[in-house]
Image: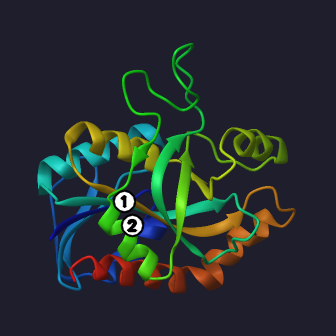
Amino acid sequence: MRTGLIVAMDKEYDRFVRLLADAAPLEAGAFKCIAGHIGGLDVALMRSGIGKVHAALGANALVGLFRPDIVISSGVAGGLDATLHPGDVVAATEIAYHDVWCGEGNVLGQVQGLPPRFACAADAVEAARRGGARTGLVVSGDRFVQASGELSAIKAAFPEALAVDMESGAIAQTCHILGVPFLAIRAISDVVGDSSQASQYKGFWDTLAERSFDTTRLIVSSLAS
């Protein structure tokens, strides 16, 4: 299986590069990209940059360059569910924007003419579930969510949401338009609205990132079986 793996930040990219066997750079214009193998998968790893525009352009470039059978958006997210903790791994069953409103006749999060939510590939979600990930709704938007008021608004609109990030919505939309199966896997770096959120985020990179990304590697590898 040819797998496109897209991350936003160098911190994420560098960890996955260390997991690639037979790594060789790929020319992808403005985007950092490398090809190799994880388990039995042919993988192209891309660092897109942060936010919707970077994510959409990167995903489009990755699909055009590598022609993957599936695109996986990986990285970190803020936890929205009180039962989640830094270091936990979440796989999205579906993705919704929390910051899109196209007016009457559309639901919150819906880009007019597109589904209100973008469904992730069911077989990949099941593989992630078997690998120990929590599964459910992930919401996405161009904002780093910190304040309790922002959390309350998102939870009121999407009460079942497990996590929030800044890229998976745009990547899911791009894959939907291009007809490529999609999965989002996120390591929880901090719990939104917690008084210790800033220290949680720092502590994640200091102590929990390697374990979380290893869980993600095992999930990605399991897609080949």
Which mark is drawn over residue 123? none
- Measuring from the top left, give residue 96's x and y in whole percent: 51, 42
Q: Is residue 114 above or below residue 67?
A: above
Residue 32 horizontal side relative to residue 68, left or right = right
Q: Which residue is mark 1?
A: 183
Q: Amino acid at mark 1?
A: Leu
Q: CA distance from mark 1 to mark 2?
A: 7 Å
Residues at circles 1 and 2 in contact by the CB criterion of under 8 Å: yes
Q: Circle 2 — which element?
A: helix
Q: Which residue is mark 2?
A: 125
In this view, the residue in front, 204 or 3, is 3
Q: Is residue 150 visible?
A: yes
In this view, the residue in front, 177 or 4, is 177
Q: Tell me which corner region of the image, top left, top right, bottom left or bottom right, holds residue 73.
A: bottom left
Q: Residue furthest right?
A: 195
Quadrant in which the N terminus is drawn:
bottom left
